[in-house]
Amino acid sequence: MTTAVIEPIVTIRSRTVVMPSTNIDTDQLIPARFLTTTTKEGLGKALFADWRYDADGKPQPDFILNRPEAVGCRVLVAGRNIGCGSSREHAPWALVDYGFQAVISTEIADIFRNNSLKNGLLPVVVDETTHGWLLANPGAKVEIDLASATLRIPGRAAVSFPIDPFARYCLMNGVDELGFLLSKDAAIKAYEAKRVS
Amino acid sequence: MSAPKTMFEKVWTAHEVVPETADTPAVIFIDLHLTHEVTTPQAFSLLRERRLRLRRPDLTLATMDHATPTRTEQVFGGAPITIDSAAKQIRQLEVNCAEFGVELLGLQDARRGIVHIIGPELGVTQPGKTIVCGDSHTSTHGAFGALAFGIGTTEVGHVLATQCLLQKKPKTFAIEVDGSLAAGVTPKDLILAIIGKVGVSGGTGHVFEYRGAAIRAMSMDERMTVCNMSIEAGARAGMIAPDETTYAYLADTPRTPKGAAWEAALARWRSLPSDPGATFDKAVHIDAATLEPMVTYGTNPGMVVAVSGHVPDRKGDSVFDAAMKYMGLNPGEPIGNAPVNVVFVGSCTNGRLSDLRAAARVLRGHKVASGVHMLVVPGSQEVKRLAEAEGLHEVFRAAGAEWRESGCSMCLGMNGDTVGKGQYSVSTSNRNFEGRQGVGARTLLASPETAAASAIRGRVTDPRELLS
């Protein structure tokens, strides 16, 4: 687990983009017609495609990602239960390719959260009060410190968020889980030897 | 004597290669890795980059379903696949399987089909197994008492390389369904009602176990429909204890153990059900007898009403208001007012033989209403063969419906089988998200019976009106 394979995350400082919709599912994050790709690259342009572009492919001027204030933002604040639905890892690939490093919500769906952690996209689950403030203050400057697992908002008390220690280690060091799994080869062999098939 | 255990705990513990610690998740062994064309290309690329081999070809099975055409001339007649990127993805799976030694049930294979339909058909889905696939509806296989869940492509790579996954132990959630379903009310109606009750994120972090008299009374096809949609309530997996129904189904499948090995397997499987007194982290109770045929009215599978009922009025709720705008429906109006432009019978939820029989039973002697396009897509080539052997395709064609080759098809429209912008689709699939069946498509999820009845009447229809 020594080779960095993804960009290490230590601290994320950014203004926020707010998408308050509840239950933003992975079909919205990236519609199925973009899943015929055989690579991970370039999916940022398909992120939120059906909300972001009109039928002719022109940007919808009112959609938040098409507005000037969204440029350069690396933190997405989403309504409750983002990432529900399909297991498509294309969803975090698209978010990361677009430039996001963290997603903040009160609930984040299981498979999407797992997939995000494996791609350098930090899932941050916060309490209702903090979430409510973030939704009401789009463009707020936030700082997410991974070592202490805290979200800092100027003028407010720091908020801690849950993060699995192993996932945090991988994110901070830019290593993936595969190296760890491969290092368990002896244990896997021992399991296979006694396994009833 | 040890504490009573849930079925989930038994399966989980039996697959711990390395138990979870404070610092690291558990290493869990995977007994069956199902793969398809959409969520694997980048995982095979990872193996190439790291110079890794496929660890267990014997526990890995590939098929193609999502991007595949359903028109016979494209599957068997050499007609070109319309979407270039889909054709390329299909070819890439062929290349990857050949290079890494994965058994592939390819485009023209008689055993091909939706991955969650063919696993049980072949008998590779078995009680007590851990089963994963890069597909959220892997929960389907839990109907056999397997721990089966969807994973992302990075995890697909992990399983290809190590046959293991790093996992945190989820919590357990009992869904107790007492009583029995009334005539004309199906397991699809039950699972839609469950999602409506639990909510679309109510199962997050949990594994469901469906229990109770109504579940025990179900066939395997019906149990699969229920487990299939566990993910729509946020639960990655849903399990049902194996019983004589399970064993009778599996005994007739080609890849289950035979002879003495079958007897040994049966003995193991009989120890799987949750022990009396086992406790669950959460539970809900549902009385099956109170249910009616259900249909969704909004843009997630939890937005559900009785087919005979009305769209609720939750004006002011942002999810509700957005759904009304997208769906073009009005709060308080009868859901039976909703027009129907397209009817889709198929998918991993309701694409099995019994589902096609149910739709045909309603359609027989009727015509699909003028202006309605009905598409019937069997879940596998084996389902297609069996359906044709009993003449179901003739019933569909006589009614004016299209009969296709197997695949995911219009459930998510990846292969070009889509619903048009603004059109209403009564669909037996699993997701009514915005744009799921095509850009701007409006999906109403329902049972095969309700879908067929709605096709005949050209509006959302309670199938009991046609079955009485």
Image: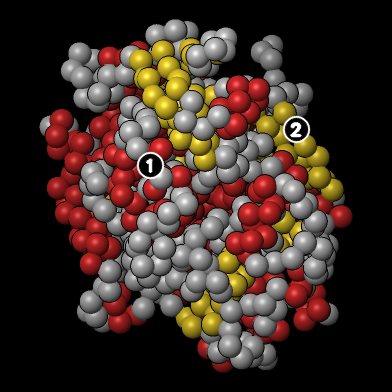
Helix, strand or loop under label 1:
helix
Left or right of residue B192: residue A61: left
Name the mark nearer the viewer: 1 or 2: 1
Q: Nearer the viewer, residue A40 or B256?
A: A40
Tag shown at residue A161: none
User: For the residue marked with disc 1, what is the amino acid?
Assistant: Pro
Task: Pinpoint the chain carrying mark 1.
Answer: A
Q: Nearer the viewer, residue A130 or B40?
A: A130
| Residue depicted at x 56% and y 74% | B423
Q: Is residue B117 above or below residue B316?
A: below
Q: CA distance from mark 1 to mark 2?
A: 47 Å
Q: Is residue B350 above or below residue B120?
A: below
| Residue depicted at x 57% and y 40% | A20
Q: Nearer the viewer, residue B419 or A98?
A: A98
Q: Nearer the viewer, residue A164 or B380?
A: A164
Q: Residue A191's x, y, as percent?
A: 36, 21
Identify the image quadrant of residue B373.
Answer: bottom right
Residue B128 appearing in the image: no
Identify the image quadrant of residue B151.
Answer: top left
Left or right of residue B282: residue B233: left
| Residue depicted at x 64% and y 88% | B369
| Residue depicted at x 55% and y 71% | B422
- Say which residue label 2 marks: B283
Q: Residue A48's x, y, as percent?
A: 42, 50
- Say which residue label 1 marks: A68
Quarter holding the C terminus of chain B is bottom right
Q: Is residue B416 above or below residue B180?
A: below
